[in-house]
Amino acid sequence: MREIIRPTILMCPPDYYGIEYEINPWMNRDTPSDSARSMQQWQTLHDLLRELNVKICLMDPVKGLPDLVFTANAGLVWKNKIFLATFRHPARQGETPIDNAWFTANGFETITLPVGLNFEGAGDALFCGDTLYGGYLVRSDASSIQWLGSELNCRAIPLQLVDDRFYHLDTCFCPLDATSAIYFPHAFDDYARRALQQIPLLIEVNEKEAARFACNAVVVGRHVVLNEGCPLLEASLSKHGFIPHSTPLDEFLKAGGSAKCLTLRLDGEEAAT
Ligand code: ARG
């Protein structure tokens, strides 16, 4: 009998999540997160993904690493390899040894990019079809994306991010399948926008919904899980045959994150071919 492979996602409970430093325009220590609400919102996302038949793997939270909940940034997973993040900000650099240990213990080969290259994992590197799109300038370096492209022997397109609010690629771009994606055009420079417009179906998000992190969605087959408050995107998704599921994630918006940031697909994104 053929083995049925379930989509698998890595998450990390928000026990030590909080706004302890400010490394993006969303973070403000004077607007702290509420622990009970964060826990509840994270759990609801977790349970929703489970209902969509996702297998969830958990990483133990670590005191003093409030952003470890954003597992998307651990690295770029490719088959049984993970290209680990090399965080730009010292505040997050302590996460990498923890990620390294988890992936090693779970049978992955862990790879570190050449010294001097910043790279923030699936937050800034997303496959759509056979192309690896990479966000650069704010966190990751363009050379990191080029290096990954030659390592994986695939087409790699660095996309310049021009609005600090959308500091990771997954805050303004979300591949849905090999030929469709969601994006917020104003987060990109002209060249990047033109490169993205090669994708056959590109669903545009408006400024208001982009600021609700509409693009930061988790895709599981035709299901798309996103923050609540994005009705226009939900309507376009439905029109194009996707099934949107919204869930409250505003506690994580305070750190500049939402659904996608809180997850890392371990078995390969379905949009990748
Ligand atoms: N506070 C975190 C940071 O600024 C949020 C990370 C969100 N992750 C993501 N994949 N966009 O690094």
Image: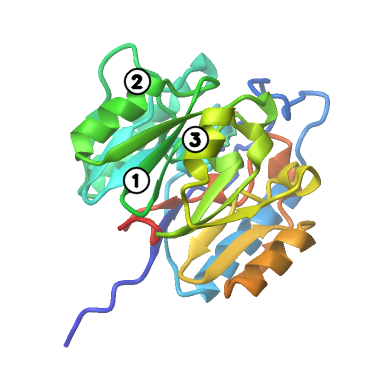
Q: In the rendered view of the protein, which quadrant contains the N terminus? A: bottom left
Q: Which mark is residue 173?
A: none
Q: Splitting the image into 4 quarters, where does residue 18 fall?
A: top right
Q: Splitting the image into 4 quarters, where does residue 103 fall?
A: top left
What amino acid type should be assigned to the residue bearing mark 1? Thr
Q: Splitting the image into 4 quarters, where does residue 252 fall?
A: top right
Residue 66 point in image, percent of width and height: 58, 32
What amino acid type should be assigned to the residue bearing mark 3? Val
Residue 267 point in image, percent of width and height: 32, 58
User: Is residue 30 left or right of 226 when viewed as pictured?
Assistant: right
Q: Which residue is mark 1?
A: 131
Residue at (19% x, 83% y) in the render: 2
Measured Cα–Cα span from mark 2 to mark 1:
16 Å
Q: Which residue is mark 3?
A: 62
The image quadrant in which ligand 1 is located: top right
Residue at (64% x, 33% y) in the render: 187
- Badge nearest the viewer, 3 or 1: 1
Among numbered discs 2 and 1, the one appearing first in the sequence: 1
Task: Note whether residue 26 is visible.
Answer: yes
Q: Identify the element where label 3 is drawn.
A: loop
Residue 122 lies, with reference to residue 236, above or below; the image says above
Q: Which residue is mark 2?
A: 143
**Callout 2 crowding tier (Cα within 10 Å): few <14, some 14–19, many ≥20:** some
Among numbered discs 3 and 2, the one appearing first in the sequence: 3
In the displayed image of the protein, which residue is found farthest to the left? 1
What amino acid type should be assigned to the residue bearing mark 2? Ser
- Badge nearest the viewer, 3 or 2: 2
Measured Cα–Cα span from mark 3 to mark 2:
31 Å
| Of 88 and 154, the residue lying toward us | 154
Q: Are discs 2 and 1 less than 8 Å apart at CB?
A: no
